[in-house]
Image (tube, rainbow, N blue to C red):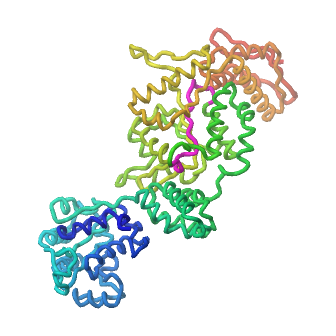
């Protein structure tokens, strides 16, 4: 049982003979495990501190906060009476308001009293002054008095306890400061005093969370009736899923589970409810399997000429739906549902496939979150993603990425042209890919465990040769196997040698999906689809049926697919300049009121590469 006593509490117990003041910072508002008899219980910090001091013959605490003032602890009649007499307290509703000057005197009196072992706890000490490095005269005098008190105090043996009965001999009557951050006190206060111990309270580790899970398990349906093996499995899973959370968060998860009637077997749903706010999980809906089963044909109708990329993408998506992402790891519950790295030439369907995935999973292609990483080429741009650091202008607004994920935890997140982001910003993705969470400048955490992360990149199409010039690494005529091997190799070289961040590539793993060049056959299909869109638009806008002669269709095919280097996007640009522009000119000059159809006879281009149409 004693092994679960928090490290900070063990340190205080050990240092009481040699330290007169303790500064506790960090996770001070959490609950902690306290051994009581032969069992553990979850208690707040003050109760845990009191439990430790009681073992060392301490009889009472005085607790101060800037709002209520000073009050005795615990709130028991004998303790209140003794504290009132010893320190001349004039309590109003259980507390006595005091000024900083009075508080400094009380510090000295607590440190010097020999009647009983006692301690003074300064709660909400981060709010004692507005700016710890710019103190007014009264505040400065208060901290100097506290420093003097730390230096002049002596360990005591209480007069009401014979020396042979005192546990551990002489000990200080300590002053305990509770801070959010160490810098909330003047820096010189702790640096210049050897009698002040500074202790940081960390988030609970795995074993602590596992022990807390056993205490909280009774709030889950069916836990008490389980055998020891099933309970141990539940506790282990609860501890794995709650990585990075406080014990108060574990208690909140258990309370949510109790209110919603969740059984211990639904621990994943309970943790998800706490993190993302809802229990309804689209990943576990029955219709998801049906959608994926018929997805190949539907996606190939939108993303043409990429059968290998589509097949691999659907394999990764199927793995995510079945809950097998990261199954080879001991704990993978917090990782994103899926990670995809789309690489290949421009205009071949990388972004379109991301939209198709969003449509497939969430029923709306607009449900995806897109971040153009060329906007984050400078290191300081990370403040846009995660929010400015505390103390900077706008830090309380949060970051674009973290805010968006909190609003839409079930989403496809597209990071377009990832290689254009600053390398230091790429480091942020390590935490997303491994732990599935990010904390913004406000201290709020966004969870990515229910999202699909998609990166797109043009890496590997062009590389630098020995002289530093950019040369084409793959050609449209190369077989897909050659394109895939060379692009993958160039991506590995980029992360390993140019960025010196192989760990990012390691987190992405084998989820690199390489797209092929658009072939002439696929280009013709893409052109046909675009021309149909133009026909539909003309019909909607002008009630005209647009027809093509075989010669005109052949002209357009030649003009719009003569250069496939820019893929489908390049074909679209050519359709706009070689067909839509001259079509607009021609229709603008015609009287359309008496016409129901228009036939395009030829599409020609003059010496200045300006296209014209022959209509009838």
Magenta segment, prevailing SS (helix, strand or loop): loop
**32 with respect to 372 (left or right):** left
Q: In the image, what residue occupies the spot 44% across and 52% down?
A: 439
Q: Is residue 213 above or below residue 465?
A: below
Residue 495 x %, y %? 43, 30
In this view of the protein, which residue sits in the foreground, 229 or 324?
Answer: 229
Q: Is residue 509 above or below residue 497?
A: below
Q: In the image, what residue occupies the spot 70% across and 21% down?
A: 522
Query: Which quadrant would residue 220 be assigned to in this image?
Result: bottom right
**589 with respect to 315 (left or right):** right
Give the magenta range.
Answer: 331-349
Residue 58 x %, y %? 26, 79
Q: Is residue 585 in view from this perspective?
A: no
The image quadrant where one finds the N terminus is: bottom left
In this view of the protein, which residue sits in the foreground, 342 or 224?
Answer: 224
Query: Which quadrant would residue 270 be assigned to in this image?
Result: bottom right
Name of the residue lying farthest toward the left: 152
Name of the residue lying farthest toward the top: 607
């Amino acid at each position: 049982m004693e092994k679960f006593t928090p490290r900070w509490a063990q340190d205080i117990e050990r240092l009481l003979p040699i330290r007169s003041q303790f500064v506790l910072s960090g996770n001070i508002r959490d609950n902690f495990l306290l051994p009581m008899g032969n069992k553990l219980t979850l208690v707040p910090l003050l109760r845990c501190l009191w439990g430790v001091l009681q073992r060392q013959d301490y009889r009472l605490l005085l607790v101060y906060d800037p709002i209520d003032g000073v009050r005795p602890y615990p709130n028991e009649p004998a303790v209140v009476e003794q504290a009132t007499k010893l320190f001349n307290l004039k309590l109003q509703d259980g507390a006595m308001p005091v000024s900083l000057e009075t508080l400094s005197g009380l510090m000295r009196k607590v440190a010097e009293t020999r009647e009983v072992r006692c301690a003074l706890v300064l709660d909400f000490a981060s709010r004692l002054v507005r700016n710890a490095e710019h103190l007014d005269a009264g505040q400065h005098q208060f901290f100097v008095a506290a420093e003097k008190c730390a230096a002049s105090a002596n360990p005591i043996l209480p007069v009401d306890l014979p020396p042979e009965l005192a546990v551990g001999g002489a000990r200080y009557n300590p002053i305990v400061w509770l801070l959010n951050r160490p810098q909330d006190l003047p820096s010189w206060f702790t640096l210049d005093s050897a009698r002040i111990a500074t202790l940081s309270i960390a988030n609970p580790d795995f074993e602590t969370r596992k022990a807390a899970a056993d205490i909280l398990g009774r709030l889950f349906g069916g836990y008490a009736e389980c055998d020891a093996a099933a309970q141990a499995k539940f506790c282990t899973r609860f501890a794995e899923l709650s990585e990075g959370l406080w014990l108060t968060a574990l208690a909140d998860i258990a309370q949510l589970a109790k209110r919603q009637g969740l059984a211990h077997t639904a621990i994943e749903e309970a943790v998800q409810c706490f993190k993302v706010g809802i229990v309804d999980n689209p990943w576990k809906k029955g219709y998801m399997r049906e959608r994926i089963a018929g997805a190949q044909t539907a996606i190939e109708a939108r993303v043409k000429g990429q059968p290998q990329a589509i097949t691999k993408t659907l394999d990764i998506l199927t793995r995510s739906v079945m809950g097998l992402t990261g199954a080879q790891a001991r704990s993978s519950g917090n990782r994103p549902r899926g990670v995809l790295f789309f690489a290949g030439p421009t205009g071949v369907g990388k972004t379109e496939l991301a939209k198709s995935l969003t449509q497939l999973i969430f029923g709306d292609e607009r449900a995806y979150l897109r971040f153009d990483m060329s906007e984050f080429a400078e290191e300081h741009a990370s403040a846009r993603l995660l929010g400015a650091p505390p103390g900077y202008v706008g830090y309380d607004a949060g970051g674009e990425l973290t805010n968006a994920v909190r609003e839409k935890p079930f989403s496809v997140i597209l990071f377009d042209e990832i290689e254009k982001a600053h390398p230091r910003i790429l480091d942020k993705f390590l935490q997303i890919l491994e732990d599935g969470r990010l904390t913004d400048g406000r201290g709020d955490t966004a969870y990515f465990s229910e999202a699909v992360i998609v990166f797109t990149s043009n890496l590997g199409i062009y590389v630098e040769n020995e002289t530093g010039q950019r040369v084409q690494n793959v050609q449209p005529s190369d077989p897909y196997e050659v394109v895939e091997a060379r692009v993958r190799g160039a991506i590995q070289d980029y992360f390993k040698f140019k960025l010196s961040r192989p760990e990012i590539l390691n987190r992405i793993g084998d989820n690199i999906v390489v797209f092929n060049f658009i072939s002439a056959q696929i280009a013709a299909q893409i052109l046909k689809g675009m021309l149909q869109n133009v026909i539909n638009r003309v019909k909607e806008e002008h009630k005209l049926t647009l027809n093509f002669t075989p010669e005109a269709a052949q002209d357009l095919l030649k003009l719009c697919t003569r250069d496939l280097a820019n893929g489908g996007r390049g074909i679209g640009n050519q359709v706009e300049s070689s067909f839509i522009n001259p079509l607009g000119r021609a229709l603008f000059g015609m009287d359309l009121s008496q016409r129901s159809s228009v036939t395009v006879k030829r599409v020609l281009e003059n010496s200045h590469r300006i296209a014209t149409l022959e209509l009838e």
